[in-house]
């Protein structure tokens, strides 16, 4: 998109160059992810595994960039280069010679982009080995299926009851597909995930390193679109020759549709990496995310770990003890031997949980449709039936329900309470006791969810 002195407004640009997923509903004023274009300080925003509500600081940063470009339209390319350089500096990527960042609208686009380039390079049918769609996004598999000469196989991460499979099981299934393709000298793309919608890492980093060593022709894309990675972890993946897909719209709080592909040095696909200047709307969305990234990276690492541990302990305690909830079993975030322990990203920031009916003595999980109704009701402040007024008036955002099996004959989905970088910044950089205020807000969100389990979906107004 060409810039001019008569640029569209910042709000218009933030939804430009996308698709129907970020279009705003004319009545509600929010997109398909439940997020609008204006900051909403009154909402308890714990839905960053799906999308984030833009902050005042991020919107102001996007506005400043838009105004600079309106005054100097010819600086668009320089602004993109500045943004690249800032991300490279923040994440210590200068130590990664020739690392390349390529921006795109979505993580979905990046998956299809890599697959198409491997096919073009090899001229053979490509097998994409990925985790199940429910843990990454159904749009990814749909996009890959539209790429000519590509087949996709999915490896489930949970069993039919929602319990996470062991690393041994997942690693073995993925390895079997890799061995079969490599034995036939066929190209394969392994899509690892760090972290999935419910906070899983697959395959294990130990298995990933073994496959990289034993099958040097295997291409690996790490789907880290949640962007819940420390600088050390991101650099470690790149050092292993993995592509890494990130987005600024989850943990980092930018508007939806802001993705970037990190390409390691000396990759054979780099020669195919010829791109035009990305569109202006994408630049503004990344600028909004970068504002949060700057402040997050300025926080003392010890303070970040201490707050994450306190938040994790409080939420997990509540999920264990409230009969309305059941935490979805999730293994420890262990990335050894890829990186040593000690980074903030080994502490969970996604907390998936199931809902249970509590109105009767018979404890039964909510059906997927009922869970969806609770998710929508959490966002409203007019749910007054059988709920205390102060709780009913609280507007809460959780991660959208994720289908995760069948329990006691009931198809179930998990909601997700998530920390974002913006919440971590608020907890640590704010006034005294801000950390406890953020934790209390999360527990109040669970209060409302618990009350909603007592209401029949048809009675939620």
Image (cartoon, rainbow, N blue to C red):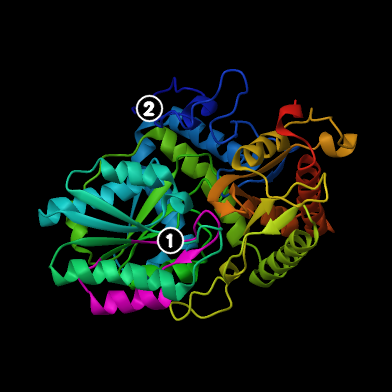
Percent across and percent down for residue 101 are 35, 54
Identify which residue is drawn at 26% across, 60% down.
189
Name the residue that disc number 2 marks: 3
Query: Compared with residue 237, is residue 251 higher up or lower down, i.e. above or below?
Result: above
* Residue 418 makes an appearance in the image: no
x, y percentage for residue 323?
Answer: 79, 56
- The quarter of the picture where residue 146 lies is top left
Q: Is residue 29 magenta?
A: no
Quarter of the image where the N terminus is located: top left
Q: Is residue 17 above or below residue 78?
A: above
Q: Is residue 12 above or below residue 52?
A: above
Q: Residues within 10 Å of mark 2 (few under 14, many from 20)?
A: some
The boundaries of the magenta stretch are: 191-218
Q: Is residue 176 visible?
A: yes
Give the quarter of the image for residue 45: top right
**In this orientation, which residue lies closer to the viewer: 448 or 365?**
365
Q: Secondary structure at mark 1?
A: strand
40 vs 406, left or right, is right
Q: Residue at x 76, y 28 (%)?
A: 459
Q: Position of residue 289 (x, y in %)?
A: 53, 46
Of tags 1 and 2, the one toward the viewer is 1
Badge 1 is on which residue? 193
Gap in Å between the C-alphas at discs 1 and 2? 37 Å
Seen in the picture, residue 359 relative to 263 is either above or below; the reply is above
How packed is label 1: few (under 14 Cα within 10 Å), some, or many (20 or more)?
A: many
Residue 11: image quadrant is: top right
Q: Position of residue 396 (x, y in %)?
A: 72, 40
Q: Is residue 127 left or right of residue 324?
A: left
Of mark 1 and mark 2, the one earlier in the sequence is: 2
Is 197 included in the stretch rendered in magenta? yes
Q: How many marks?
A: 2
* Left or right of 292, for residue 106: left
């Amino acid at each position: 998109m060409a810039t001019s002195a008569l640029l569209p407004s910042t709000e218009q640009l933030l939804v430009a160059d996308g698709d129907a997923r970020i279009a705003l509903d004319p009545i509600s004023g929010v997109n398909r992810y439940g997020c609008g274009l204006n900051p909403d300080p009154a909402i308890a925003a714990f839905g960053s595994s799906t999308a984030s509500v833009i902050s005042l600081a991020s919107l102001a940063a996007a506005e400043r960039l838009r105004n600079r470009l309106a005054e100097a339209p010819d600086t668009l390319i320089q602004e993109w280069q500045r943004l690249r350089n800032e991300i490279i500096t923040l994440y210590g990527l200068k130590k990664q010679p020739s690392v390349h960042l390529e921006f795109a609208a979505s993580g979905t686009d990046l998956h299809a982009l890599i697959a198409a380039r491997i096919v073009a390079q090899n001229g053979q049918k490509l097998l994409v080995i990925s985790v199940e769609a429910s843990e990454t996004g159904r749009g990814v598999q749909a996009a890959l299926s539209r790429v000519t000469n590509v087949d996709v196989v999915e490896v489930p991460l949970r069993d039919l009851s929602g319990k996470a499979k062991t690393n041994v099981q997942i690693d073995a299934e993925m390895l079997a597909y890799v061995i079969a393709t490599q034995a036939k000298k066929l190209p394969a793309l392994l899509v690892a995930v760090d972290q999935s919608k419910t906070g899983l890492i697959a395959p294990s980093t130990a298995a990933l390193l073994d496959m990289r060593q034993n099958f040097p022709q295997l291409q690996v894309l790490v789907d880290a679109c949640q962007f819940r990675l420390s600088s050390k972890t991101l650099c470690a993946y790149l050092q292993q020759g993995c592509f890494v897909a990130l987005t600024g719209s989850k943990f980092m709080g930018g508007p939806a549709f802001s993705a970037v592909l990190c390409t390691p040095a000396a990759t054979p696909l780099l020669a195919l990496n010829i791109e035009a200047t990305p569109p202006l709307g994408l630049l503004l969305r990344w600028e909004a995310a970068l504002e949060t990234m700057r402040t997050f990276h300025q926080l003392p690492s010890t303070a970040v770990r201490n707050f994450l541990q306190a938040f994790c302990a409080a939420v997990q305690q509540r999920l264990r003890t409230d009969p309305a909830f059941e935490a979805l079993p999730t293994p420890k975030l262990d990335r050894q031997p890829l990186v040593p322990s000690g980074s903030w990203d080994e502490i969970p920031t996604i907390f998936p949980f199931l809902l249970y009916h509590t109105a009767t003595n018979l404890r039964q999980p909510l059906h997927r449709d009922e869970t969806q109704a609770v998710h929508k009701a959490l966002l409203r402040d007019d749910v007054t039936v059988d709920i205390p007024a102060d709780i009913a008036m609280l507007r809460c955002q959780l991660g959208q329900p994720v289908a995760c099996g069948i329990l006691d004959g009931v198809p179930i989905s998990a909601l997700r309470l998530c920390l974002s970088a913006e919440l971590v910044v608020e907890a640590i950089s704010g006034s005294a006791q801000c950390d406890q205020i953020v934790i209390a807000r999360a527990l109040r969100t669970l209060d409302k969810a618990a009350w909603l389990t007592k209401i029949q979906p048809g009675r939620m107004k």
